[in-house]
Amino acid sequence: MSLKSPLGRVLGLGSAGTGTEHWIGQRISAVAMVPLTLWFAVSLVTLPALDFYSVTAWVSAPLHAVLLILLVVALVYHSSLGTQVVAEDYLHAHGLRVVVLTVLRLLHVGLAVAGIFAVFLIATRAPL
Protein backbone atom coordinates (compact mmCIF):
# COMPACT_ATOMS: atom_id res chain seq x y z
CA MET A 1 0.00 0.00 0.00
CA SER A 2 1.36 3.35 -1.04
CA LEU A 3 0.99 6.54 0.89
CA LYS A 4 1.26 8.63 -2.28
CA SER A 5 -1.75 10.51 -3.53
CA PRO A 6 -3.13 9.67 -7.01
CA LEU A 7 -1.53 12.85 -8.33
CA GLY A 8 1.81 11.92 -6.81
CA ARG A 9 1.71 8.50 -8.46
CA VAL A 10 1.25 9.93 -11.98
CA LEU A 11 3.63 12.89 -11.77
CA GLY A 12 6.35 12.42 -14.30
CA LEU A 13 4.22 10.07 -16.39
CA GLY A 14 2.09 10.85 -19.40
CA SER A 15 2.01 13.95 -21.53
CA ALA A 16 4.74 16.51 -21.07
CA GLY A 17 2.45 19.21 -22.45
CA THR A 18 4.70 20.00 -25.41
CA GLY A 19 2.80 18.19 -28.15
CA THR A 20 0.31 20.98 -28.77
CA GLU A 21 2.82 23.45 -30.15
CA HIS A 22 4.31 20.74 -32.35
CA TRP A 23 0.90 19.71 -33.69
CA ILE A 24 -0.11 23.32 -34.37
CA GLY A 25 3.21 24.00 -36.10
CA GLN A 26 2.69 21.06 -38.43
CA ARG A 27 -0.83 22.19 -39.29
CA ILE A 28 0.12 25.83 -39.86
CA SER A 29 3.06 24.90 -42.07
CA ALA A 30 0.87 22.49 -44.05
CA VAL A 31 -1.79 25.16 -44.55
CA ALA A 32 0.88 27.69 -45.59
CA MET A 33 2.31 25.26 -48.13
CA VAL A 34 -1.02 24.84 -49.98
CA PRO A 35 -1.24 28.34 -51.51
CA LEU A 36 2.53 28.63 -51.86
CA THR A 37 2.77 25.32 -53.74
CA LEU A 38 -0.19 26.23 -55.95
CA TRP A 39 1.40 29.61 -56.71
CA PHE A 40 4.72 27.91 -57.50
CA ALA A 41 3.19 25.32 -59.82
CA VAL A 42 0.96 27.80 -61.65
CA SER A 43 3.82 30.28 -62.02
CA LEU A 44 6.13 27.70 -63.53
CA VAL A 45 3.47 26.36 -65.88
CA THR A 46 2.67 29.85 -67.17
CA LEU A 47 6.30 30.68 -67.95
CA PRO A 48 6.93 30.90 -71.70
CA ALA A 49 9.79 28.41 -71.38
CA LEU A 50 11.44 26.51 -68.56
CA ASP A 51 14.96 27.36 -69.62
CA PHE A 52 17.64 28.91 -67.43
CA TYR A 53 17.04 32.48 -68.58
CA SER A 54 13.27 32.43 -68.13
CA VAL A 55 13.43 30.92 -64.66
CA THR A 56 16.24 33.26 -63.60
CA ALA A 57 14.23 36.27 -64.75
CA TRP A 58 11.16 34.92 -62.96
CA VAL A 59 13.03 34.43 -59.65
CA SER A 60 14.55 37.91 -60.00
CA ALA A 61 11.14 39.52 -59.46
CA PRO A 62 11.02 40.60 -55.79
CA LEU A 63 7.58 39.14 -55.12
CA HIS A 64 8.56 35.78 -56.58
CA ALA A 65 11.81 35.69 -54.61
CA VAL A 66 10.03 36.43 -51.33
CA LEU A 67 7.30 33.84 -51.97
CA LEU A 68 9.92 31.29 -52.99
CA ILE A 69 11.84 31.87 -49.76
CA LEU A 70 8.59 31.48 -47.79
CA LEU A 71 7.94 28.20 -49.61
CA VAL A 72 11.45 26.94 -48.81
CA VAL A 73 11.08 27.87 -45.13
CA ALA A 74 7.62 26.27 -44.85
CA LEU A 75 8.80 23.08 -46.57
CA VAL A 76 11.92 22.73 -44.42
CA TYR A 77 10.04 23.54 -41.19
CA HIS A 78 7.30 21.02 -41.99
CA SER A 79 9.88 18.39 -42.92
CA SER A 80 11.81 19.05 -39.72
CA LEU A 81 8.72 18.57 -37.57
CA GLY A 82 7.75 15.40 -39.43
CA THR A 83 11.15 13.73 -39.23
CA GLN A 84 11.42 14.69 -35.56
CA VAL A 85 8.17 12.83 -34.82
CA VAL A 86 9.37 9.76 -36.72
CA ALA A 87 12.68 9.74 -34.83
CA GLU A 88 10.96 10.18 -31.47
CA ASP A 89 8.43 7.44 -32.18
CA TYR A 90 10.75 4.79 -33.59
CA LEU A 91 14.11 5.28 -31.87
CA HIS A 92 13.96 3.88 -28.36
CA ALA A 93 17.63 4.15 -27.33
CA HIS A 94 17.98 7.57 -25.70
CA GLY A 95 21.54 8.25 -26.87
CA LEU A 96 20.80 7.30 -30.46
CA ARG A 97 17.63 9.40 -30.44
CA VAL A 98 19.54 12.46 -29.24
CA VAL A 99 22.20 12.00 -31.94
CA VAL A 100 19.64 11.46 -34.72
CA LEU A 101 17.52 14.44 -33.62
CA THR A 102 20.61 16.65 -33.51
CA VAL A 103 21.77 15.54 -36.97
CA LEU A 104 18.26 16.00 -38.39
CA ARG A 105 18.01 19.50 -36.93
CA LEU A 106 21.41 20.48 -38.35
CA LEU A 107 20.52 19.04 -41.76
CA HIS A 108 17.26 20.97 -41.86
CA VAL A 109 18.96 24.21 -40.83
CA GLY A 110 21.53 23.60 -43.56
CA LEU A 111 18.76 22.95 -46.10
CA ALA A 112 16.98 26.16 -45.13
CA VAL A 113 20.16 28.22 -45.36
CA ALA A 114 21.10 26.63 -48.70
CA GLY A 115 17.62 27.21 -50.14
CA ILE A 116 17.44 30.83 -49.04
CA PHE A 117 20.99 31.45 -50.25
CA ALA A 118 20.20 29.89 -53.64
CA VAL A 119 17.12 32.08 -54.10
CA PHE A 120 19.14 35.12 -53.04
CA LEU A 121 21.94 34.32 -55.52
CA ILE A 122 19.53 33.78 -58.38
CA ALA A 123 17.45 36.86 -57.54
CA THR A 124 20.47 39.16 -57.34
CA ARG A 125 22.31 37.73 -60.33
CA ALA A 126 22.96 40.19 -63.12
CA PRO A 127 21.02 39.34 -66.28
CA LEU A 128 23.09 37.53 -68.88
Image (cartoon, rainbow, N blue to C red):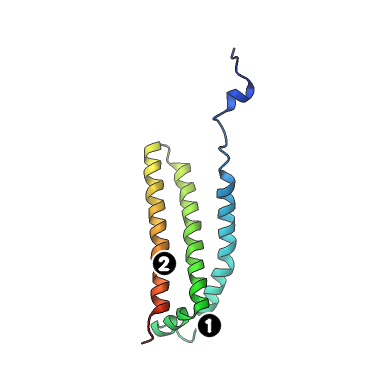
Which of the image's four quarters has the C terminus? bottom left
Is residue 50 visible in the rendered image? The answer is: no
Residue at the image point whose x is 54% and y is 69% from the top: 37
Q: Nearer the viewer, residue 112 or 126?
A: 126
What is the quadrant of residue 127 in the picture?
A: bottom left
- Element at label 2: helix
| Residue 25 image position (x, y, % from top left) | 56, 54
Residue at the image point whose x is 62% and y is 25% from the top: 7
Disc 2 residue type (three-letter):
Gly
Q: How far apart are the alpha carbons under marks 2 and 1?
A: 23 Å
Is residue 86 visible in the rendered image? The answer is: yes
Find disc 2 in the rendering and name its residue: 115
Residue at the image point whose x is 38% and y is 46% from the top: 100
Disc 1 residue type (three-letter):
Thr
Relative to residue 108, is residue 6 drawn left or right? right
Sequence-first disc among 2 and 1: 1
- Element at label 1: loop
Residue depth check, mark 2 versus mark 1: number of the one nearer the observer: 2
| Residue 56 image position (x, y, % from top left) | 42, 81
Residue at the image point whose x is 46% and y is 78% from the top: 59
Find disc 1 in the rendering and name its residue: 46
What is the quadrant of residue 50 in the picture?
A: bottom left
| Residue 14 image position (x, y, % from top left) | 57, 33
Q: Which mark is residue 112?
A: none
